[in-house]
Image (cartoon, rainbow, N blue to C red):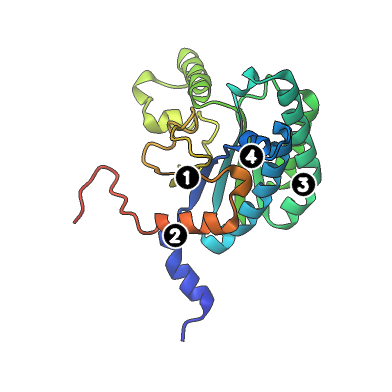
Amino acid sequence: MPDGTQDKERAAPCAPGHVAVIMDGNGRWAQSRGRPRLFGHHAGARRVREIVEACPDLGVKYLTVFAFSTENWKRTQTEVAGLMSLFRRYITKEARALCDEGVRVRFIGDRVRLDSKLISLMDELEQMTEHNDRVHLTIAINYGSRDEVSRAIKRLAKDVATGQLSPEDVTETTLTRYLDTHVLPDPDLVIRTSGEARISNFLLWQSAYAEYEFIDTLWPDFTREVFTRLVGSYGKRERRFGAVSL
């Protein structure tokens, strides 16, 4: 008789190997409770741990979360400063647990506007977890897909100008190697919480053939059970990548 492990291995191809999440609704969640927006962001940060822990059992190897966009600098100075403090606190508090649980952490986005202390903590966490392989957690901070593509094209153009790359060799695959996500597989499933039905400049290039789920649940209420249901729903979809069903 096959054991549970063998059953799980057979089920794995139906699971999305890479799930990306636009974690929206923290502020509204807090305000609905008469609390400041930062209260919601702290609740949302705690929710990330639960979802990361759920990934191995669901067959999800890669999880990418949208923490702070290039457009989020437009928020109030108080909220932005609070978020930066939260990121520093999250990394400091969770670093050891993430490492012990076999989670490899990467950060994507332009680090130029981030403070030196946060950048140092990000570098340290990436180095601390670089040999882990149970779950790959990618955190997008000061990330915008158009910004990412623009930065990638500048690096590519520089290599063409210096003769390291021929214009004739520039293909979709070539450009992909210059993106922040060049070591990651493309997302299979993109989830946005909070009832909004837009993708907000998140992984535009990488998600060309991703499946999408827009749900009403606010991110702090996004439980393991909700995540499990969405992953299960993905397994029932037919992905044709431009072809037709046989």
Real-space Cα distance between discs 3 and 1? 30 Å
- Under circle 1, the secondary element is loop
Real-space Cα distance between discs 2 and 3? 30 Å
Most foreground residue, 44 or 21: 44
The residue labelled by disc 1 is 215
Answer yes or no: do the residues labelled 3 and 1 have beta carbons within 8 Å?
A: no
Say what amino acid the circle numbered 4 marks.
Trp
Answer yes or no: do the residues labelled 1 and 4 have beta carbons within 8 Å?
A: no
Label drawn at residue 29: 4
- Under circle 2, the secondary element is helix
Say what amino acid the circle numbered 1 marks.
Ile
Most foreground residue, 203 or 124: 203
Mark closer to the observer (1, 2): 1
Label drawn at residue 67: none
The residue labelled by disc 3 is 95
Say what amino acid the circle numbered 2 marks.
Gly
Q: Residue at x 48, y 75 (%)?
A: 6
